[in-house]
């Protein structure tokens, strides 16, 4: 297979040309999703159950999954799977707790004491896709940060596409993560239920989780009613490699992300044309016997590329302009190159991207569509309100009076100064 090749002359221009564009949805889709959202908002459970049957393909009597069904799910998955999910959860918890601890601090300066108090959201709804594949790992990636942040109520929605019910792997993952409620519902109707509530589903403060076109549009439509994370696009991998990289490993890593689906974006940026030639050769060999070949070939033929740069400076600038979801660096200069990268969802140095999908303790719910240029991947921070607690001694107030008087006069707010002066001098001072 010969990946499409471009020469990096103008990094910003080439990056925009090669990446998946920002999400845009046809008017017909917007109108259909709007009708579904309004239907659930006005019709409650009755409308929601009708949409579950129509779009999820299952007639269900109860939206909420029973505890007995969740317990039974353990008999339907291998014991090794339980161990694997538990290990993934444990590693992610360690990283998220460390992040949270860094927010708890007290600063003291000139009579002022300032504390940052992380305050969790009260409720969160997690969307877990189903259908062609099941994504219990994405449930873990959303649930663990929420639980570590201290969210009191975490609910999950997943379409009943497995024999008329939620897939047992998702149910087991939900149980291991301490999910409070699991619902048999998918699509735009699940998002609407979390946003507005029904007789059976209580509304939430925030909705997170990767989703297809219908639920993504629904999230955008309800974002004025409830907080959301970010629009989720096709997975993206950009590999930055020099002439010393192993072409076979590069090819394997490109294939690993291309198997997500035919719209996955997988590229190599390198200064070595010889490496690019070798990667093409290895892709041709490996594709002859690869599983999920239809997805892999569709992705690499439609969205795969090699960007050839004259030097590492241009290569890194291309990376920053592309702002990939996953950036994998294969070079003896990996640490130094990583320091120069400003925009990427996650940076992996000499480590395959597939590790970050499951076992590194990093979150794999990451910005796509180039959003890594201005936002981070999901973490405990997304489930917190950072409340500032401050107090100031009289001496600290007095030390600030001169500056405070000047600022209040410039802004035309003289009573600001008089209020603080009253505290310094005493009542009526």
Image: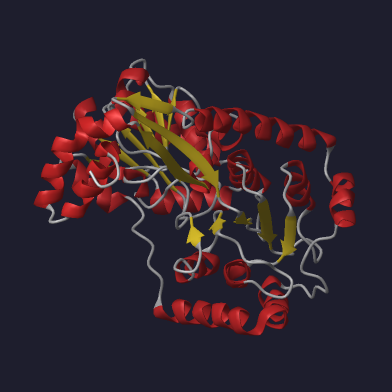
Q: How many marks?
A: 0
* Quadrant (top left/top right/bottom left/bottom right) for the C terminus: top left
In this rendering, is residue 222 above or below 283?
below
* Quadrant (top left/top right/bottom left/bottom right) for the N terminus: top left
Q: Nearer the viewer, residue 87 or 306?
A: 87
Instruction: Report which quarter residue 204 is drawn in.
Output: bottom right
Q: Can residue 379 be seen here? A: no
Display colour scheme: secondary structure
Q: Position of residue 395 (x, y in %)?
A: 28, 28
Instruction: Report which quarter residue 209 is drawn in.
Output: bottom right
Q: Residue furthest front?
A: 428
In this rendering, is residue 17 above or below 27?
above
In this rendering, is residue 141 above or below 209?
above
Which residue does the image show at 41% across and 49% down from the upper left? 368
Q: Is residue 155 left or right of residue 383?
A: right
Q: Nearer the viewer, residue 334 or 141?
A: 141
Q: Is residue 14 left or right of residue 121?
A: left
Q: Residue furthest top?
A: 332
Which residue does the image show at 46% across and 71% down from the upper left? 221
Q: Is residue 198 left or right of residue 402?
A: right
In this rendering, is residue 251 above or below 296?
above
Q: Position of residue 413 (x, y in %)?
A: 17, 55
Q: Position of residue 95 (x, y in %)?
A: 56, 29
Q: Nearer the viewer, residue 246 or 409?
A: 409
Q: Position of residue 170 (x, y in %)?
A: 73, 50
Which residue does the image show at 14% across and 43% down from the upper left? 405
């Amino acid at each position: 297979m010969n990946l499409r090749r471009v020469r990096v002359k103008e990094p910003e221009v080439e990056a925009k040309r090669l990446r998946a564009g920002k999400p845009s949805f046809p008017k017909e889709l917007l109108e259909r999703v709007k009708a579904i959202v309004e239907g659930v908002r006005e019709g409650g459970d009755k409308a929601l159950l009708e949409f579950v049957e129509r779009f999820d393909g299952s007639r269900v009597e109860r939206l909420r999954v029973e505890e007995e069904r969740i317990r039974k799910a353990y008999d339907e998955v291998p014991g090794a799977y339980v161990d694997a999910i538990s290990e993934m959860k444990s590693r992610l918890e360690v990283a998220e707790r460390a992040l949270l601890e860094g927010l708890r601090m007290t600063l003291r300066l000139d009579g002022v004491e300032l504390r940052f108090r992380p305050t969790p959201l009260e409720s969160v709804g997690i969307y877990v896709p189903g259908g062609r594949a099941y994504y219990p790992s994405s449930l873990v990636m959303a649930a663990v940060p929420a639980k570590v942040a201290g969210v009191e109520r975490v609910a999950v929605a997943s379409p009943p596409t497995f024999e008329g019910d939620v897939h047992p792997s998702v149910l087991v993952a939900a149980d291991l993560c301490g999910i409070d409620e699991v619902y048999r519902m998918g699509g735009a109707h699940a998002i609407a239920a979390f946003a507005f509530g029904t007789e059976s589903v209580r509304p939430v403060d925030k909705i997170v989780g990767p989703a297809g076109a219908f639920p993504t549009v629904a999230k955008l439509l309800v974002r004025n009613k409830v907080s959301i994370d970010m629009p989720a696009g096709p997975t993206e991998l950009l590999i930055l490699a020099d002439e010393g990289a192993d072409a076979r490993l590069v090819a394997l890593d490109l294939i690993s992300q291309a198997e997500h689906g035919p719209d996955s974006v997988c590229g190599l940026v390198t200064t070595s044309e010889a490496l690019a030639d070798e990667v093409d050769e290895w892709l041709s060999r490996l594709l002859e016997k690869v599983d999920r070949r239809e997805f892999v070939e569709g992705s690499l033929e439609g969205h795969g590329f090699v960007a050839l740069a004259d030097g590492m400076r241009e290569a890194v600038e291309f990376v920053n302009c592309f702002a990939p979801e996953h950036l994998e660096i294969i070079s003896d200069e990996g640490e130094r190159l990583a320091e120069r990268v400003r925009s990427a969802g996650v940076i992996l140095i000499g480590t395959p991207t597939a590790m970050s999908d499951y076992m590194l303790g990093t979150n794999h719910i990451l910005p796509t569509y180039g959003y890594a240029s201005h936002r981070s991947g999901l973490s405990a921070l997304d489930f917190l309100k950072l409340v500032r607690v401050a107090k100031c001694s009289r001496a600290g107030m007095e030390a600030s009076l001169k500056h405070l008087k000047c600022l209040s006069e410039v802004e035309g707010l003289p009573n600001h100064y008089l209020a603080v002066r009253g505290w310094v001098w005493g009542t009526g001072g």
